[in-house]
Amino acid sequence: MLLLFGWGPLLLVLLASWLGLWQNLDPVVGLGLLFVVTLIPALACLGIGLLQTWMSKSE
């Protein structure tokens, strides 16, 4: 969920800009901050999930 709601908006705007659909990149600053704030918790949750899956499969 953190990946979807934290990284999704920024990636959509960057994709739209690359395709030429979005000309003004001023709101990207706020979306970039949202990306930064959700980066560490999202990676931590993914790491914990991978570790738990790996530990349960090895037992």
Image: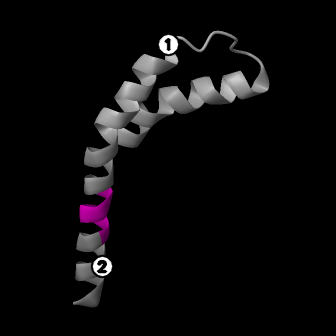
Labelled disc at residue 54: 2
Residue 22 seen in the figure: yes
Secondary structure beneath disc 2? helix
Which residue extends farthest right?
20
Task: Residue at 77% x, 26% y: name it.
Answer: 19
From the viewer's perspective, tell me whether residue 30 is left or right of residue 15.
left
Q: Which quarter of the image is occupied by the N terminus? A: top left
How many neighbours does mark 1 have within 10 angstroms: few (below 14), some (14-19), or many (20 or more)? few
Labelled disc at residue 27: 1
Here the colouring is one colour
Instruction: Name the amino acid, label 2.
Output: Trp
- Residue 24 drawn at (x, y percent): 63, 9
From the viewer's perspective, tell me whether residue 11 is left or right of residue 52.
right
Q: Is residue 37 above or below residue 42?
A: above
Task: Residue at 49% x, 33% y: name it.
Answer: 8
8 or 26: nearer the viewer: 26
Secondary structure beneath disc 1? loop
Q: Determine the image quadrant of residue 16.
A: top right
Q: Which quarter of the image is occupied by the C terminus? A: bottom left
Mark toward the viewer: 2 or 1: 1
Task: Residue at 44% x, 23% y: name it.
Answer: 31
18 or 45: nearer the viewer: 18
Q: Main secondary structure of the magenta part?
A: helix
Q: Is residue 16 above or below residue 41?
A: above
Q: Is residue 31 above or below residue 54?
A: above
- Residue 36 drawn at (x, y percent): 35, 35
Instruction: Name the amino acid, label 1.
Output: Pro
From the viewer's perspective, tell me whether residue 17 is left or right of residue 30.
right
Give the mark, 2 or 1, whose residue is nearer the N terminus: 1
Q: Would residue 49 be counted in the magenta stretch?
A: yes
The range drawn in magenta is: 46-50
